[in-house]
Image: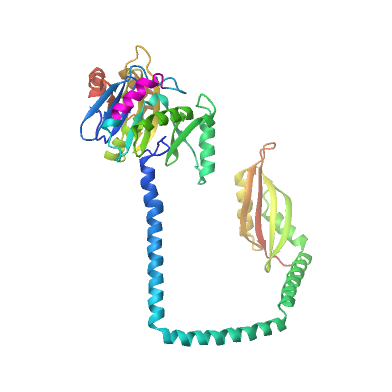
């Protein structure tokens, strides 16, 4: 069916408004009314139980007050600072212990002759080292061969192409990929 | 090949605007036609209504016969509309991006800035049927049609309406729909339930519908559907003149 109509007030739109807006609003309204009425009936039928529940709620809130005071004593802020420091040190440590010679050797093994790497950028993500690699390949096949060889190499895993585009000047395929490195430091 | 002719099949309270007259189909089988006497010029794109008084009188006359609560469908002369079937490898999900892409593509086919046109489109698969009409024309027609006092009305190019009737009846069908008017003709090709080709154009002197159909056949080659549906003026006479090739 062709749905083309130049009219600013077509007949179908009004029908659509009825089914698309007013009918769902009506259904929601009915559901809300039903919920409220069920709640009210339940509330008034079991008023004695609710009295007990409200007294228990009061006790719970009193206990919560005590707990929050204890929490303040434990010093949550100190814990946050500790986590930040831990993450920072973890990041620095992983970067420092990264053996660039073994990484470059592994990359050299995986690199086809028609692909060149322009940027290697390591980053610590959680407890593993991730590499962002930018480069240029002569063809798409070369780029895929590189990714394939990274996958086959045991020190790399989860190679994933983030971006690729044909360079207007050189007609080479520029790409950037991320890969997880688990080589020995 | 089998050729069918038809006019006004299954119409419900419909007004057909042609170059010469305004036809009103009440939906109960009554047809009321009012001569426009050149009040509507479908080739003056920006302001097609040349004789405002005659046009308004015709509309008032139809308005008296109209059931206002039901709403009304107004079929426009195809020559007021620029239509094109565009193909895209990928159609964006975002409505804004989709609008932008289609309008950008239509810019090349329209005689003015795309901003001056009311562009409507219908997507089916990777092809998009786009129709554009000058905003000034839409505004002018809507102002005049307000005289009908109808609750609501649709403004649809004539051929698209016939295509919808065909598709309602035969989902996934194949056919060529030709609409014959005194000064213009429209051809619309439906393949597998989709509009695959559309051409609205002014009639060339000495070129018959049969020859136009032959041209269609040359353009489409093997994709030319076997069936032709003919609408509009003198449909039966034209059908007889089509010759054996289209009648077999």
Residue A113 in view here: no
Q: Residue at x 39, y 54 (%)?
A: A22
> Looking at the picture, does residue B234 appear above or below residue B160?
above
Q: Quarter of the image for the C terminus of chain B: give it.
A: top left
Within the magenta stretch, is there residue A67?
no
- Can residue A18 be seen at all in this image of the molecule? yes
* Percent x, y of residue B52: 39, 21
* Front residue (pair B130, B224): B130
Compared across the picture, whether B143 is left or right of B113 comes to: left
Q: Is residue A93 left or right of residue A69?
A: right
Residue A154 falls in which quadrant of the image? Answer: bottom right
Q: Position of residue B24 (x, y in %)?
A: 27, 29
Q: Is the residue A130 above or below the residue B158 in the image? A: below
- The vertical placement of A41 against A31, above or below, is below
Where residue B2 appears, as percent x and y from the top left, is: 23, 28
Q: Quadrant of the N terminus of chain B?
A: top left
Task: Report the number of numbered marks.
Answer: 0
> Is residue B127 left or right of B11 when viewed as pictured?
right
Magenta extent: B49-62
Question: Is residue B58 in the magenta section?
Answer: yes
Instruction: Specify how the rendered protein is coloured.
Output: rainbow
Q: Nearer the viewer, residue B158 or B63?
A: B63
Q: Residue at x 28, y 31 (%)?
A: B64
The residue located at (36%, 12%) in the rendering is B205
């Amino acid at each position: 069916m062709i749905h083309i109509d130049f009219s600013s007030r077509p007949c179908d739109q009004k029908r659509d408004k009825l089914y698309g807006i007013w009918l769902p609003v009506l259904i929601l309204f009915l559901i809300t009314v039903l919920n409220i009425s069920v709640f009210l009936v339940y509330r008034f039928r079991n008023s004695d139980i609710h009295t007990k529940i409200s007294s228990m709620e009061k006790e719970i809130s009193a206990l919560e007050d005590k707990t929050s005071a204890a929490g303040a004593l434990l010093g949550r802020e100190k814990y946050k600072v500790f986590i930040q420091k831990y993450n920072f040190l973890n990041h620095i440590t992983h970067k420092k212990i990264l053996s660039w010679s073994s990484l470059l050797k592994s990359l050299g093994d995986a690199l086809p002759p028609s692909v060149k790497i322009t940027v290697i950028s390591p980053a610590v993500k959680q407890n593993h080292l991730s590499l962002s690699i930018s480069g240029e390949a002569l063809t798409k096949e070369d780029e895929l061969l590189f990714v394939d060889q990274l996958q086959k190499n045991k020190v790399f895993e989860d190679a994933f192409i983030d971006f690729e585009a044909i360079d207007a000047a050189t007609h080479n395929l520029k790409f950037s990929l991320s890969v997880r490195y688990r080589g020995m430091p | 090949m089998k050729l069918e002719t038809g006019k006004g099949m299954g119409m419900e309270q419909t007004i057909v605007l042609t170059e010469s007259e305004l036809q009103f189909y009440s939906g109960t089988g009554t047809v009321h036609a009012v001569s426009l006497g050149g009040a509507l010029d479908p080739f003056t794109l920006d302001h097609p209504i040349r004789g405002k008084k005659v046009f308004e009188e015709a509309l008032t006359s139809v308005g008296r016969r109209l059931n206002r609560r039901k709403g009304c469908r107004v079929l426009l002369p195809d020559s007021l509309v620029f239509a094109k079937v565009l193909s895209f490898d990928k159609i964006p999900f975002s409505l804004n991006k989709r609008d932008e892409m289609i309008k950008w593509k239509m810019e090349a086919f329209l005689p003015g800035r795309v901003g001056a046109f009311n562009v409507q489109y219908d997507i089916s698969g990777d092809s998009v049927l786009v129709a554009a009409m000058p905003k000034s024309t839409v505004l002018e027609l809507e102002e005049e049609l307000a005289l009908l006092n109808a609750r609501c009305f649709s403004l649809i190019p004539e051929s698209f309406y016939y295509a919808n009737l065909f598709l309602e009846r035969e989902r996934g069908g194949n056919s060529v729909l030709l609409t014959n008017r005194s000064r213009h003709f429209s051809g619309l090709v439906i393949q597998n339930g989709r509009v695959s080709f559309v051409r609205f154009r002014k009639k060339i002197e000495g070129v018959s519908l049969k020859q136009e159909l032959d041209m269609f056949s040359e353009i489409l080659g093997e994709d030319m559907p076997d069936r032709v549906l003919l609408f509009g003026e003198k449909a039966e006479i034209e059908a007889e003149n089509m010759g054996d090739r289209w009648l077999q």
